[in-house]
Image: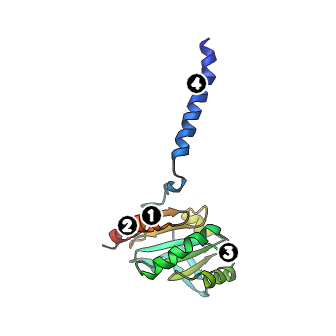
Amino acid sequence: MKKAYIPLAIFAVLVAFLGIGLTLNPREIPSPLIGKPAPDFTAPVLDNPALTVTKQDMLGKVWLLNTWASWCVACREEHPLLVEFAKTKTIPIVGLDYKDKDADGLKWLARYGNPYDVAIADRDAKIGINFGVYGVPESFLIDKAGIIRYKQIGPFTEEAIRDKLIPLVRELQK
């Protein structure tokens, strides 16, 4: 008779795990890179491929690396917020055009506005892979020493910029 309850107990445990999983926010997946040095990179500038940008160029600044692409629907949702945030000149924003054609990225920026202090190309996704990007948009707040301090998975919202990004930037700029 007790053996008959084993499948019921297993089912109850599975339902409990499913219930717990459904309450978690998938955008709050912790990045293993938080608190670690940003990966080194050298990338061509999107509108002038003869020039390059490296992580070392950004040392001494608190800055935001925003991955985006012209084919990304969620990037269109986030982009107007980045354009407005960029007007505050709070921090430099580096746009990483991920798995995209340069011409498509440039056309997209011309159409929707360019919030980036510099836009760089990641045609083969090597930089994105090193940062652990698995979808766009994703953003990384990097401190003066080149350490990743925050990762935004998915598009920024007004609340995320106001309540998470700006306070952390102010703290890091001290």
* Disc 3: which residue: 100
Q: Are marks 3 and 1 in contact (CB under 8 Å)?
A: no
Q: Position of residue 79 (x, y in %)?
A: 56, 74
Q: Are marks 1 and 2 in contact (CB under 8 Å)?
A: yes
Counting residues from the start of the chain, the first of labels 1 and 2 encountered is 1
Q: Of the numbered discs in the image, which one, if any, rests on residue 5? A: none
Counting residues from the start of the chain, the first of labels 4 and 1 encountered is 4
Task: Give the foreground label among 2 and 3.
Answer: 2
Kind of residue at badge 1: Tyr
Task: Give the foreground label among 4 and 1.
Answer: 4
- Is 42 placed left or right of 108 in the picture? left
Tag 3 secondary structure: loop
Residue 115 visible at all: yes
Q: Of the numbered discs in the image, which one, if any, rests on residue 150? A: 1
* Figure quadrant of the C terminus: bottom left
* Disc 2: which residue: 168
Q: Are marks 2 and 4 in contact (CB under 8 Å)?
A: no
Counting residues from the start of the chain, the first of labels 3 and 1 encountered is 3
